[in-house]
Structures are given as C-alpha cells and as structure tokens.
Amino acid sequence: MRSSSIIGSALLALVVFQACKKNEAPVAVPTLTERTISGIPADTIVGMVNGQPVGAGKFTFFSFETNAVVPSTDSNSVKWDLGVRGTTIITNGGNSGPGAGGAFVYVGTFDDLKAVPKDSVFRQDNAPVSYAVPNSSNKGWYVYNPVSLLITPIPGRVLVFKTAKGKYAKVEILNYYKGGITPSATASDTEKLKNQRYYTFRFAYQADGTMNFK
Amino acid sequence: MRVFFSLVFSLFVVDAFAQVPLDTSVAASLDEVVVTATRTPRSMGNVAIPVSVISSKTLYQSGSLRLNDILAEQTGIQVIDNFGKGIQVQGLSSEYTLILIDGEPLIGRTAGVLDLSKITVRNIRKIEIVKGPSSSLYGSEAMGGVINIITDRAGQNNTAIGLRYGRFNTVDGNLNFSRRFNKTDIAASLNYNQSKGYSLKPNAVQKTVEPFRRSTQTLSIHHQLGDHWKAGASFRANSSHIDNTIFVQNLGSTIASKGFEKNEEYNFAPYLQFNKEQKIKSNLRGYLTGFNAVQELAVKNATGGYDDRFKQLFARVENQTDWQVAKNAALTAGAGIVRETVRSNRYDTASTLRGNTIAYFFTQHEQKISNKLTMIGGVRFDANQAYASVWSPKIALQYKPSEKVKLNLSYGRGFKAPDFRQLYLNFTNLAAGAYSVFGSEVAGAEIKRLLAAQLLDQTTSLIGSLSALKPEVSGGLNLGIAYTLNASSHFTANIFRNDLKNMIVNDIIAFKKNGGQIYSYFNLKRALTQGIELGAQQKIGQWIQLNAGYQFLYTADKEVLQSIKKGEVFQRSLSNGQAYRMSLADYGGLPNRSRHAANLKFNAENAKGYFSTIRIMYRSRWGTSDLDGNGLINRSDEYAHGNLQVNASMGLPMNSHLKFMAGVDNLFNYKDVQFLPGNPGRTAYVDIQFIF
C-alpha cells in the first residue's frame, strides 16, 4: 500500500514535470543523494608515546551508498568508499582496498562541480608512499598551521571519488574537530588534541553510475 | 571616565596660571631646518618630499621614553609588536624602513625588525621622519622611509638629570651633559631603563613581558680646527638584558627553561669636515658599529637547551661633498665603501664568518627653475659582492603657486638588500617536523649533501629557480599639497603609492625522506601599498594647539589580486562552513595593516611652561592570521579589534632648574591579550628633571 503510493506520486511528479518541459527527455527518479555528515571519528587520540599523540591506529570506514559508517570487520570488502585515520583519507582501491575506488582533488567550490570532467584521472592509493588524496599540509585537502597547531580544510577543494563499486561522489571536508568547531588558536594544546580527528563533511553521491552531480 | 575629566579639568587649572602669551605660530614650524630628506640642510617648507619633525619638546611633553613610544603617536606610522617593536611606514613593514642615528644606520635586526624600544629618546634633539623611497641617498632599507634621530645637543651648554618612575617598576634615569669650551663642544649622556615586566593573563606561569634592564651611553666631541675645518667623533654604547623564564608546552607536557637574552650594540663615528663660505662643504666620515646578541636557555633537569649567538659588524667610510654651483643650483655627490660581516650559529658555527662588501656612489642636483618651481634629481648606485647591484633614482618637484600653497611631487626607487638570514641561514628544526631552512647561497650545497647521504625524497619545481637573490625593490610615488590658511591653521594631504617587486619569501624546494620540508628563499612576491595621509594643525587662542591626522591605507599581494580576479581563491563561510569564491572586496590585504588610522592631539601650554596634553590614537581592525585555510586575511574573525588609545600628560615647572611632569598612557586601559601583548594597559608615571 505504502510503496504503491510512493510509486504513484513519483509517476504523478514525472507527468507534471514532463508537462512543464515538453521538449526535454524524460527525467528519471532522482538518484543523487546530498548529505552533511558530522562527528566521524578518525583514529582519535588515546595517549602519548614518546611525546607524540597517538590513536589506536584504526581507520573509520564510510559508505556513500548507505550513508553510514561501515564496521572495520568489513574493511576487505567493497562495502565502504572512504576511510579516515587522522589526516589520511583512503579510497577503496589501489592498495587500500579490494574495490574500484580512486580519487582526485578538484579546485573549485562544491556547487561548481556539476559533473566529473570527462578527462579526469582518478589517482590510486599507494600507501604509505602516496595517496589518491595527498596527505600533507597544503598539498591535498588541509593546511597545518605550525604556530597554532591547528588543521584547517582548504576552502575550494573538492575530493572527487570513484566508489568501491565504480560510481561517483564528491566530498567537501568542512571541519576536522569535534562538533564541527575548530578550537581557538589560543586554546590549550590538550584541548586541541582532545578535540581533533573528527570529520565533518558534505557529499553528493550519484547512484546511477553517471558522472553527473545534478 | 572620571580620570579623563579630572585631567581635562586640571588642564584648565594649569592654564589659569598662564599669564604671558607665547609666540609659537603653526607656520613657524615650517621654517624648521631638516637634513634627512635631501642630506643637506633645508627648511622644511622647501622640501619636495614628505617630511615631518618631532621636537625634543614634543618628546618631553608626550612623556616618551623609547623611540616606539613617540612614533606610535605619529600619523601614517604604526608600531607593530613582532620580534620587538617594529615600525610600519606607508604600509611597508619594519625591514623596509631605515633607522639612522645622526645619519648613520643602526644594525641589529631580528627577522628584519629593528626593535625601536632599544633606543632611548631622552638624550636627543629631534627626530626627522621622511616618507617614501630614499634609497637614492641612503641605499638599502630606505624603501618605506627614513627615521633619523638627531642627538646633537652641543649648543645647550647644560647638565640635566631626569628621573622617571612608573607602573611595573619602570625606572628611567637620564643624565645629559653638554658644554662649549672655546672651540670645542662636548656632549655626553647616560641612560638607564628597567622594568619588572608584566603578565596580561592573571594566573599565567610565564610573564607576557619579562623583566629587563637597558642602558645607553653616548659621548660626542666636535672641534673647530680653523676657519674652514672641523673634526669630531661620536660614540654610543647600548645594551639590554632580558631575564627569560619560558614554559614550552610540548604536546601536553610543560617544559620549563630559564635563561637570558643579551643585546649589545656600539657605534663609533669620526668625521672631518671642510666648509667654505656656504660654497662648498665636504664631509669625510667613518662609521663602525657592532651588534652582539646572545640568547641562552637551559632546560631544567636536562642537557642541551638553547644557545643562540649572533655577531654583526658594519664598517663604512664615506665622503659627501655639497657644492653650491650657482645661486639657484646645488650639487651633492658622495661615495663610500661598506664592509659588513656576520658570525652566528644560526648559519654555521658561531666562528664562521659571512660577509659582504658594498661600494656605492650617489649624486643629487637641486635646481631652482623659477621662484615657484624647484626640482631635485638624484641617483645612487650600489655595487654588491654578495648579490646583484642596484640603481636607485629619485626625482622631486615642488611648485608654489602662491605663498599659501605648496604642491609636492616625487618618485623614487627604493631597495632592500637580501639579508644574511636569506643568504646564509642553515637551520634544521628537529622538534617540529624536522624541517630545514637554507639560505639561497647555501641551499644548493645542502641539497647535494642530503642527496649524497640518500636523505632526500623528492624536489619541487622551485629547485630549478634557486639562484643568487636579487635585492627587493620598490617604486614609490608621493603627491602632496600643503595649505597654510593663516598663522594658526595649516593643512596637508599626501597621496602615496608603493609598488614592491622581487620581494623575498620562503618556499619549499624539497622533501626529506623523514617527511621534513626544506625551504629556501626566492624573489617571488609582488605587493602594493597605497593611500592618503591627511593632517591639520590648528592653534586656538594663545595656548592651545590641536593636531589631527588620518591615514587611509590599502595593501595587497599582487599575485593574490590576480588569483582572485581569475576566481581561483576561496574562503569558508563562518555560518555553514561551506567554501565559496572570494571577491576582491573580501580580501583584507597584507597582515597587520589597518585600513584607517587617526589621531587627535590636544596640547595646552602657557608662557611659564605649564602644559597639558591629551593624545587620542585610533587604529581600525587589522588582519592577524588565516583561520579558514586559504592563507589570506578575509574573514571577520581573522582580524584583531580596532581600538582607541588615549594618552595624557601634564607638566609643572617649578623654576628654570626643576620641572615636574606626570602622565597616564592608555587612560582607558585597553588591552588585547592575544594581539597586543606589548600593551600592558593603563600605565601612570611621574617624572622629575633637574637642569643646571
């Protein structure tokens, strides 16, 4: 009963939509999901070893398709698309995972990127030497300030992903700290350490396998 | 507020004592003879270049102790607290302003900043400030302007003792002596200055400003050898000692280290001068100055610690000859040789010597074309051993359509030589990411060494651009108008524009296998500063003088402007955290620059010397550091708050031998712990002077 009413209203919408734009091709049911995700922990700091802050060393895996964190027991599967550990971002491909994943960094705004450019080259992870999303300050998605010791995502950097199953997604990292709030530059080192390694990002995932983000 | 009103009130009480009117018209100040703008004595109203003078009386009445105190109150100048109190002129930072004492340059800069608080102003006659490039006369560093501290007190023939006590146990003692014996003038001074420092955060373990003590001794002798010959020498020694207790928070654990910082500086300047009936004047001068800095920090219960040694030496011989060719033409020519050396463990071992030799000549021609039009043209050439040579021309025009109006137009080129740090620094930070910084002259060899040792991972495209550094250069245009309404009112306006290129910045040339980055220096950046400076002087009645000043300043990195125009620069919204394209209007320009700065100074003085001053300084917000990841100043939270500072003082002369004064700086106790650590808040002081 419920599913038929959804289909019914979708059909109705289709008819109405087509009625408005007679000269255009039929429009499919929307396959693009756009979400903002917050509080994804990325190997949060558990202690100090030799004066260096350390986490447990584990990645957190995320699936664009299900819009959810994937348990690490599924790390050797195509169930996840993006993994985070500290500032390192991995794709499900290359030597990071069994999938078809890859990524590159697009310079522009999230909304600018209306489709993956045809001539795009998706880079592959070759951990720990290089990553599809370069993992150093001012090279990939973030900049590290050696004075304030804060990590800030560079504005105008969109991470374009090929997912484990070969579909496309775009990601904008919004923040690297708990609650999506970067501590003040004058906050204590302890506070800066305690609250870091929590990702806030928004993404758009195209389920139909095309390169469009519209 | 109550303090303010009682001060204003007391001002009128003081004024009530006044009986005899003074004759100090505003216009009279234009007859003041200045030497810095053209390296020849000229009355201020006849100089086609923006120049201003701070008199010893202003210094005294403002209660200034150190050079930064008084410069912070001048229109178009900001004092920036970074590696000491540096100066910003026409939007150019401290490394681009030349500081002279009696025409000789001061050395001892840290990261390009000459700390103005090293310099006492209790023993000087006046300060001359020239704005705009003056490298055509002074060579390196004279890009934003030249500040010349003139100490000559030879004619005063007195002994004065000054004592000051103020908040934070600030003590300043000063002895000035000058005597004329027949054909010999002798002047000497001693200055001692100390403070116990202060904490801006109430319970902080580390003080914001550590306890320090400084002293300065000067001696000068001038002797008339005959009708035409004069010889003399001046000597100055300056030292400062700062106690350091530093608590470093290193990844959660606090490390305490104790130590000190010691700076010593000395200058010696002999001269021999020939002067014939205002026709020809020739001056042969020698100059030797040294700067030694030591910084030691010992970590409690640990070996190692921090040990920094820096020794700089600057020696120069120069001749300048001024020739009055005709009634309407004057020619100045000069030449000299400079030898400069540095030894520092920042570069190699503390015993390795790094040096540069400079040979230069300059010439300047001043032609009075008509009664209304005067033209000055000059050029200087600096041939350097350690970096590229440079020409610095300058041309200036003054047009006086009437007695009341003066129009000034000048264009000059300025330059700043690469400093020893940019040439020879060899620094590897083992604590923070093992990054290295190599000066341009040593980078090539260091890269080869790392490559041979198989420590190098990869190089960047910049490595191909490694080459001998060129001097940073600027072109500066000044267009000014001065209007004297009457003996009581005087107005000035000056439009300026400085275009800087070949600015030296550091950038990554390679990565080490351990992940550390390797930086070196390149002539990469281009920038501009432009604005307008306005001034008004108004005398009200017989005793009151009002001065108002304003500067509008626009600055930008030219590469950034281009990128913004191309749509390649982004910023992150404070509200939703999303990135969007930056517009030109969002760009806040170079850091530490305030778009608006203004001052209003109120001075009342009667014939007996009772005085009262109120000086109000405003500075609009200025960019501090990037917070949204684009490396630029753009978002509202990336600025420090604009602020108003009010200083007041008053003086009570008892008789010709005894003078009292008292004052309050920062009357409304404005503080900014994060961005103005050098501002301790409200500071009161009392001051007594004995004159024999």
Image (cartoon, coloured by chain):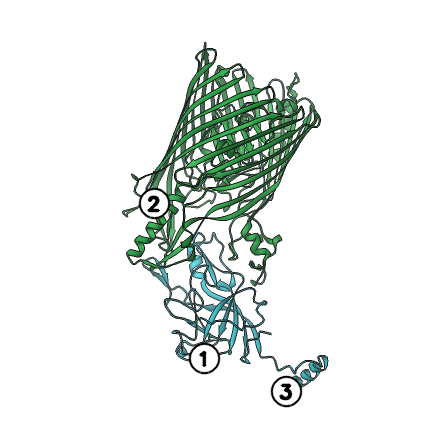
Q: Amino acid at mark 2?
A: Ser
Q: Chain of mark 1?
A: A
Instruction: Tell me if residue B126 can be seen.
Output: yes
Foreground residue among B545 and B674: B545
Name the colour assigned to chain A in the rendering: cyan
Q: Quadrant of the C terminus of chain A?
A: bottom right
Foreground residue among A43 and B389: B389
Q: In the image, which is nearer the foreground, mark 3 or mark 2?
A: 3
Name the colour assigned to chain B in the rendering: green
Foreground residue among B623 and B475: B475
Image x and y of residue B434, in percent: 35, 54
Q: Secondary structure at mark 3?
A: helix
Question: Which residue lies under the disc numbered 2?
Answer: B257
CA gap, disc 3 and disc 2: 73 Å
Question: Which residue lies under the disc numbered 1?
Answer: A79
Question: Which residue lies under the disc numbered 3?
Answer: A7
Query: Do circles 1 and 3 both sit on a common chain?
Result: yes
Query: Do circles 3 and 2 both sit on a common chain?
Result: no
State yes or no: discs 3 and 2 in contact (Cβ < 8 Å).
Answer: no
Is B480 situated left or right of B259 in this image? right
Image x and y of residue B402, in percent: 71, 26
Residue located at (29% from left, 56% from top): B452
Q: Chain of mark 2?
A: B
Is A104 situated left or right of A112 in this image? left
Query: Do circles 2 and 1 both sit on a common chain?
Result: no
